[in-house]
Image (cartoon, helix red, strand yellow):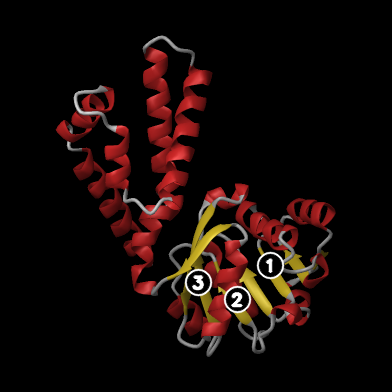
Amino acid sequence: MEKKNIKLGVIGAGKMGGAIIKGTVKSGFLPSDNIFVFDLNKESVNEIKNNLKVNTAQNIDELINSTSAVLIATKPFAADSVLDSIKDKINNHLIISIMAGVSTTRIENKLTGAHVIRVMSNTPALVNEGMSVVCKGNFATDDEADLVLELFSKLGCALKIDEKYIDIVTAISGSGPAFFYYFIEEIARAGEKLGLDYKTCLKLSAQTALGASRMIMNSKDTPGVLIKNVTTPGGCTEVGNNVLADFKTDEILYKTIKDTMEKAKSLG
């Protein structure tokens, strides 16, 4: 499937669906004329249509008949309903799903023989800083997986993994933004308790987190080396590092990710 020939149908015009459509159009990955959107919430559909000049479909039949690839961007609880509504209509369509906890096998069992690509993205995709992973189903091709990888790279970073690791991914990058928000918030609140206004503390904390992340992404050094580079023996940072070690922060974070992963596994 060549990119220039793709007609993309999007089922679900919520925040994530809208972010994907925006990234697809704004990056030039696909022209707006090649995108068709359907959602029961007509207000959301009209907002996307007015802002990005994409096509709207009045029903599932119209969307399927107008497209060659279908992105399912609905909530997981609607999976069976959506899949049942398209199972007798798809014809060599590439199926892309961002439904959390819905495996490619489950989709393939509903859509016999369908080429399915599963994607786990996260909410920072709304500001083009998303982390997405792409998992290929039993019938999808490497070229199709590469195409979806390219699409989601327009929303931040994207990589391919084996689906057997998807629950770990869910814990790290799917749920992970909430954990980082917690740290950023609590560091800011600590500064507020010590006498500096909260707004300033939050900016200091958030920008520092952003800068530290970019250092890791852009440096050949490991996080351990970067920690060492900031830490003067007997200095301020060393005192803080010792507090984190004394409270066994590494064990707390391991349990956080492990329990989140196990919950994700139970949903799938």
Cα distance between the residues tagged 1 and 3: 14 Å
Mark 3 packing: few (<14 Cα in 10 Å), some, or many (20+)?
A: many
Q: Is residue 117 left or right of residue 89?
A: left
In the rendered view, tell whether residue 144 sits above or below residue 29.
below
Q: Earlier in the sequence, mark 1 or mark 3?
A: 1
Residue 17 rendering spot, x and y as whole percentages: 64, 59
As shown in the figure, which amino acid type bears the numbered disc 3? Arg
Nearest the camera: 113 or 23? 23
Which residue has dot 1 on it?
A: 10
At mark 2, the secondary structure is helix
Residue drawn at x 43%, y 29% is 185
Which residue has dot 3 on it?
A: 118
Residue 91 rendering spot, x and y as whole percentages: 67, 89
Cα distance between the residues tagged 2 and 1: 16 Å
Residue 237 in view in this figure: yes
Residue drawn at x 23%, y 48% is 255
At mark 3, the secondary structure is strand
As shown in the figure, which amino acid type bears the numbered disc 2? Leu
Q: Is residue 179 left or right of residue 82?
A: left
Mark 1 packing: few (<14 Cα in 10 Å), some, or many (20+)?
A: many
Nearest the camera: 103 or 181? 181
In the rendered view, tell whether residue 206 sits above or below residue 137.
above
Q: List the single residue furthest toward the top.
A: 195
Q: Which mark is residue 147?
A: 2
